[in-house]
Image (cartoon, rainbow, N blue to C red):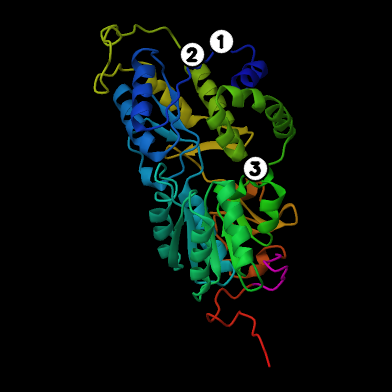
Amino acid sequence: MALSDFYTTYPHYSTRLALHHKNSNDILSAASSASELVNEEQVDAIIGPQNSDQSRFVAEIGGKSQVPIISFSETSSSLWPSPTPYFIRTAVPDSSELEGIASLVKVLGWHDLVLLYQNDTEEEFGNGFIPSLTHTFQQASVQLSYVSAISTSSSVSHIKKELRHLRSMQTRVFLVHLTSHDLASRIFSLAQEVGMMSKGTAWIITSSLSNSIGSMDASTIESMEGVLGMRPYIPKSKELDNFKIRWNKNKCLLMQQQHNYIEKVDNDFNTCLRAYDTVWALATAAEKIQFQQVKRSSEILNTPSPAITQIRNSETGPRLLDEILKTRFLGLSGEFKLKHRILEAPAFEIINIIGNGDRTVGYWTPRRGFSRKIASAAEEDHGAVVYPNYDENVLKPIIWPGESTQKPKGWEIPGMDLKLRWGH
């Protein structure tokens, strides 16, 4: 869809990108696929891979071959600084969001919180998030009082036991970092059952969940009433509305072809938009350097199973990399602008889950702090001063768990929030 839209918009362009698809489910297959793309398909750029472990190996191949590796979904701060000059991330890094969450916690007058994160052994998702969170919170003087790891395979009894353990602590502010809608549904419905979604508690979800509120079922959203979320701000536009309509029409067909991947992207629509904008950035850069046919090496191509250490060197890669890094435009997901080979942090939207959906209660940017309205591009460019915003009134009124309008104080003496039972 991205390429079709790009060349429909710019029919006079002389270059055309040709996509070569490769599936990779683990580190070895990702490295093998990247090697084949570089040596056999002789590509000049690779879009992917999907997680940190794969990225480290594929980035090494990109560095040796001088082929830009562009990841639109890798957010882990464990890959900073970049393992190679040829590794580019067009996703919003965890560190930017965590800085916003730490600021939100301070604005609301809290000092510590509990983290619940998804811990699945086949993915680095949760484990790679914790070091960045710890570092960011230490700098902001926010205390992480407890960490709870829950996997998608955890039983109801195990989750309920863990939630009761959390309830026995003083802290009443909970940060949830996970991607599974099913796990989110179980955690929040069980939290309701054990009395942890009542007045006096506060829950915050990261963008891994808040990006996909629109694709959750009604019962899951209902169980999350009063929760706060932070996610990258996506500006409204006619182009975005049109894309959503076409995406919903085409995704069923795409799922038949690449079911697991498309289902994962559809659960996080923002990732879909980043992928779209990434293709536009690459196509723009390709047009600027005006690809010329170059002499390809045939020595490695004749090797039946090329080793990862035997890599073709791209003559186009360095020029393409330079143009990608300079590319700037307004895409479906917002402004596309790279800084230090990472997408420059956008504004973040703070949402409050109410009823069967969510409402925006404010915005945050690293430069301007919190505001009730999104700043214009001009205001953001010239607003170098970060406002302290230690007043919670910088946000619109929030409905908290238990349908309360009173901000939770963030802590309770264990047992004091339990109802007393009198008998004769």
Neighbour class for label 2 at 10 Å: few (<14), some, many (≥20)?
few
Residue at (66% x, 47% y) in the render: 213
Q: CA distance from mark 2 to mark 3?
A: 31 Å
- Disc 2 target residue: 290
Residue, disc 1: 14
Label for residue 234?
Answer: 3
Q: CA distance from mark 3 to mark 1?
A: 31 Å
Q: Position of residue 288 (x, y in %)?
A: 51, 19
In the image, what residue type sits under mark 3? Ile
Label whose residue precedes the other's in the sequence (2 or 3): 3
Q: Secondary structure at mark 2?
A: loop
Q: Looking at the image, can residue 370 be seen?
A: no
Compared across the picture, whether 227 is left or right of 298 comes to right
Q: Main secondary structure of the magenta part?
A: loop
> Quarter holding the C terminus?
bottom right
Front residue of this view, candidates 398 and 89: 398
Q: Point out the image quarter for the N terminus.
A: top right
Residue positioned 48% across, 19% down in the render: 21
Task: State the residue at coordinates (48%, 30%).
Answer: 326
Expressed as whole percent of the image width and height from the top left, the position of residue 101 reads 53, 59
Which residues lie in the magenta part?
Answer: 398-407
Give x and y (percent) for residue 153.
48, 49
Location of residue 44 (image quadrant): top left
| Pair 3/1: label in front | 3
For residue 4, above or below residue 322: above
Indicate left or right for 423 with 140 as reference.
right
Give the residue at x 59% y 38%: 335
